[in-house]
């Protein structure tokens, strides 16, 4: 079954974290968390859930480059951008239409845009 990568974009200027989420209105935060929990439970019930996670902001990134003689570790993201991936799901879906339906539900739960991309399948 094809797998899809659903990503949650964040604005680089904001860099929301679990700590900064505590600044949200508690009722609004609870509403969002409940909606995401329901979405995750629906994925599990449909046997579509593979994995999900939230990422720390780009300011915490370290870029590793071992293409030369000596590996380097640079404390920065590999690219500067106005937005970044803040969280993700990897899901199983029969096709792109099904993946887009799941993304619509994720978008509604989070009140945010969701990007959908298919994972490459192994060559046959």
Image (cartoon, rainbow, N blue to C red):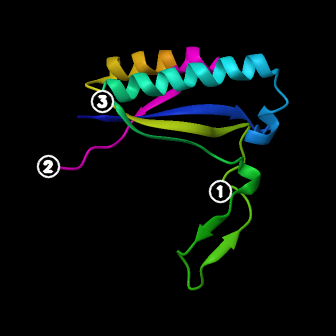
Q: Which residue is labeled 3 in the image?
A: 47
Of the residues tagged 1 and 3, which is closer to the observer? Answer: 3
Q: State yes or no: residue 78 in magenta.
A: no
- Badge 1 marks a residue whose secondary structure is loop
Residue 20 position by quadrant: top right
Q: State yes or no: residue 120 in magenta.
A: yes
Residue 26 position by quadrant: top right
User: Which numbered circle lies on residue 78?
Assistant: 1
User: Which numbered circle lies on residue 48?
Assistant: none
- Count of labels shown? 3
Judge the density around disc 3: few (<14), some (14-19), many (≥20) Cα neighbours within 10 Å: few
Name the residue nearer the viewer: 122 or 40: 40
Residue 47 position by quadrant: top left
Q: Which residue is labeled 2 in the image?
A: 124
Would residue 31 be found to the left or right of residue 37 on screen? right
> How far apart, in angstroms, are the residues tagged by discs 1 and 3?
34 Å
Give residue 64's position: percent from left, percent from top: 60, 68
Q: Which residues are magenta?
A: 106-124
- Residue at horizontal 81%, vertical 25%? 24
Residue 17 visible in this rendered orientation of the protein = no
- Residue at horizontal 66%, vertical 40%? 84
Judge the density around disc 2: few (<14), some (14-19), many (≥20) Cα neighbours within 10 Å: few
> How far apart, in angstroms, are the residues tagged by discs 3 and 2?
24 Å
Would residue 26 be found to the left or right of residue 32 on screen? right
- Furthest toward the bottom, the residue is 69
Give residue 120's position: percent from left, percent from top: 32, 43
Give residue 50's position: percent from left, percent from top: 37, 39
- Residue at horizontal 71%, vertical 50%? 58
């Amino acid at each position: 079954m094809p797998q899809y990568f659903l990503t949650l974009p964040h604005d680089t200027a904001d860099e929301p974290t679990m700590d900064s989420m505590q600044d949200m209105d508690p009722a609004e935060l609870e509403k969002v968390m409940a909606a995401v929990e329901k979405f995750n439970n629906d994925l599990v019930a449909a046997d579509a859930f593979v994995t999900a996670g939230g990422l720390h902001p780009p300011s915490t990134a370290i870029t590793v480059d071992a293409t030369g003689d000596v590996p380097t570790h640079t404390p920065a993201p590999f690219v500067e951008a106005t937005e970044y991936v803040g969280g993700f799901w990897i899901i199983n879906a029969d096709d792109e239409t099904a993946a887009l339906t799941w993304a619509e539900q994720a978008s509604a739960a989070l009140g945010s845009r969701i990007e959908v991309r298919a994972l490459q399948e192994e060559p046959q």
